[in-house]
Image: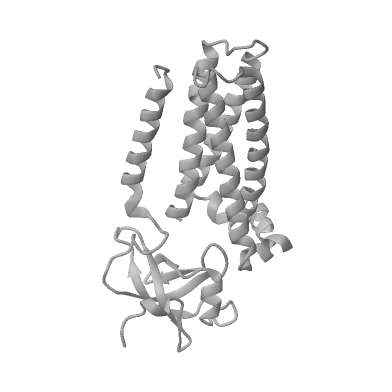
Amino acid sequence: MQSPFNGIRSVTLAAAVILAAGTAAYAHHGWSWTQDGFFELRGKITAIYIGNPHATLDVDADGEAWRVDLAPPSRTIAAGFTEEVAKVGDEVTAIGHRSRDETEKWMKAARVIVNGKAYDVYPDRVPPA
Amino acid sequence: MDEFLAGIEQLAIVRGLKASFVAYPIVNALHIMSIGALLTSVWLMDLRILGAFRSLPYVPFVTLLRRTAFTAFAGALVTGSLLFSVRAREYAAMPIFLTKMTLILLAVANFLTFMRHAKGGDEPPGGTVTILAVLSLVLWTSVLFAGRFIGFLN
């Protein structure tokens, strides 16, 4: 076929590949965007969201505003972490993996500890005891 | 604006969706289905306008696909609004989300311009309409990509 859309198709495909490659490091789905080693964050909770698509905590750690991703709500609630067990102002320790991009104050937690109790939202990913 | 968005998050149906184990993935799946149908109909329609599938009669082919695209867009609008509503303030502050909304507005404006230029005739008139069809392909495909990246940037 000698229609102009062959060219268009190539351009679109090329744009897609460039976009995908350029932004792969930012992916916040899954764990591919986080470092391999464990990371621990301590701070004060500034916001709690238990809901779809996944639960999050906003944490103030020594004046730095962090975002902590947890599991989807079903999994987070199954781990016992609900809106009843933590409130804004509580001290929190989050253990998991931080973003590979360290300028980003963002991590994904496997375990959060609030008021002396540990909640394993990703039990298969908590550090070995 | 912030109050309005916070109000959306507090609606009963939205709170239900936010906490649901089943409804949210279903709405999510229906959004993907709508987008799939929309992109397919847009691509086939625009490629026909650009000269592909010449063996298929132009008017009924494009009319059918335009109707499909309309229905799919309506579905995407409803399901997308629901997905947005659970964290309205969060999404509204994301540059990638605002980029997607801008692209949708441009794509819709492009479609309205197309409708003004493409009146009657058994074959596409070429000229401006060809450019608009190319723009349509680029814009709707960009909407798809921008939308997918919302899930990876927040």
Looking at this rendering, what residue extends furthest in the front direction? B55
Screen quadrant of the N terminus of chain A:
top left
Is residue B88 at least partly visible in the picture?
Answer: no
Given residues B2 and B66, the one toward you in this image is B66
User: How many discs mark residues in the rendered view?
Assistant: 0
Which residue is at 36% across, 29% downward?
Answer: A10
Is residue A93 found left or right of B144 in the rendered image? left
State the image coordinates of residue B49 (x, y, percent, origin top left).
54, 19
Question: For this rendering, which residue is in front, B60 or B12?
Answer: B60
Residue A31 visible? The answer is: yes
Task: Give the quarter of the figure containing the C terminus of chain A.
Answer: bottom left
The residue depicted at 62 percent of the width and 24 percent of the height is B61
Q: Position of residue B25 (x, y in %)?
A: 58, 60
Horizontal and vertical percent for residue B10?
Answer: 69, 62
User: Residue at the spot x=54%, y=79% of the render?
Assistant: A78
Query: Measured along the vertical axis of the image, is residue A122 above or below residue A17?
Result: below
Which residue extends farthest left?
A37
The answer to which quarter of the image holds residue B102 is top right
Q: Quarter of the image holding residue A107?
A: bottom left
Q: Is residue A65 above or below residue B142?
A: below
Corner quadrant of residue A109: bottom left
Residue at the image position 62 percent from the left and 55 percent from the top: B27
Q: Is residue B111 above or below residue B128?
A: below
- Compared across the picture, whether B25 is left or right of A25 comes to right
Q: How is the image coloured?
A: one colour
Above or below, comparing residue A106 to residue B91 in the picture: below
Camera-side residue: A107 or B42?
B42
